Image: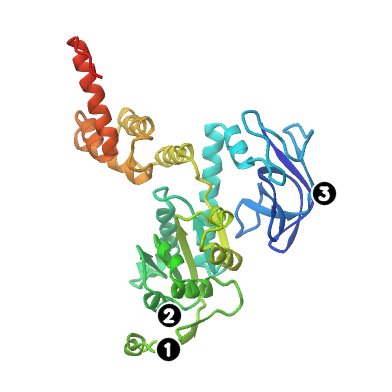
Amino acid sequence: MSIQVQITKGHYRGKVVSGTFPLVKGFVDGARGGYVTIKNPAPDTGTPPVQRIAVEKDAFKLLDAAGGDLPEHIVVPGQDAPAAGESSDFERVFMESETDDEAMQRISDTFAMLDKLTDACAKGTVRGLVVSGPPGIGKSFGVEKQLEIASMFLTMSGKNANYEAITGGVSAIGLYQKLYHNRSAKKVVLLDDCDGVLFEEECLTLLKGALNSGDKRRIAWNKESRILETDGIPNQFDFEGSIIFLSNVDFEKSIAKGSRISAHLEAIMSRCHYLDLEISSTRDKLLRIRQVVRDGMLKPYEFNGIQESQVLSFVTDNAEYLREISLRMTKKVADFVKTDPKGWYAMAEATCLTKEAKFKRLYERKKAEQAKQGVIVL
């Protein structure tokens, strides 16, 4: 079931929005007013395709694929009617209506937008970007690849790249130092797998300051520090570079649940560009893996068609038992196929599946063997 929304007048990032768009999520009456979530097929440069449009209840209506009117709170077959004041889960409805090819195209479009936004950060046009998505789907790889391309001529001439990646966590004083050393225009600080900074007050203050989209971003360290003195770093400076924060946290869901950091997440989202990679289900993760493999991720392994299919089949067939569904896991399976084309399956089972899954399979095999011998296993 394809659902559209016809907006008479709405607002997105200070601009008036009108027209008919694919609906991602229905009307929500939030603390700051009502909004609907749409997919804009032609977003402005620097904005994501999925957009939350501020709108009054009487300024939009829902349409079916043929353009016929739908009730404001439709009830999808198999879904309970929404309670008073709540809207149907249109994100789920929309995604369930997609074919695999359509979903792969949606995911591909979102990652193409990530490439554009990363390039805009490298050029200094976009100065603050938060990217949200589950681990292992290629956030880091895609962003670093774009930043490397942007720094290609610098590195070819023997100079340092125009970006610095911080991975796995950083202290407040460490973050201050990194921001200072990359404070110049067109320099980029990439924070990857550093969600811990969201729970540390001093780091949050620095992050919010650096992500601010205002004309002037003054970063300050209001404590005495021998580390800064030794390095000759002042207690305040103007940050003119860009910052990209790759996060496994779904900011919108965390805010909706009222988590203890929701106020901070709202503050960050209001200060910079925010891109949700729209991979929220097991199906989406598997389709993302299929898409990246199709685009050549396994090419270095020099597999034939059968071997590549074996890798994808193992990941798909064992999705519920894998330690994680990710591009990293797919490469681990590919390593085994390359190492031992005949015995790879046992190697993958031994290292890629959870302990519970492995013992479950051992138990099932034992039952099957004993059944052949006429022994009943309870």
Image point 28% across, 42% down: which residue?
332
Q: Which residue is mark 2?
A: 180
Q: In terms of secondary structure, where does tag 3 sit? A: helix
Front-most of 33 and 68?
A: 33
Q: Nearer the viewer, mark 3 or mark 2?
A: 3
Q: In terms of secondary structure, where does tag 1 sit? A: loop
- Local crowd size for mark 1, using a 10 Å CA cut-off: few (<14), some (14–19), many (≥20): few
- Identity of the amino acid at label 3? Asp
The quadrant in which residue 343 appears is top left
Q: Is residue 272 left or right of residue 328?
A: right
* Mark 3 and mark 2: Cα distance apart in space: 49 Å
Instruction: Pick whichever of labels 3 and 2 is earlier in the sequence.
Output: 3
Image point 58% across, 80% down: which residue?
216
Instruction: Pick whichever of labels 1 and 3 is earlier in the sequence.
Output: 3
Q: Is residue 331 left or right of residue 125?
A: left
The quadrant in which residue 317 appears is top left
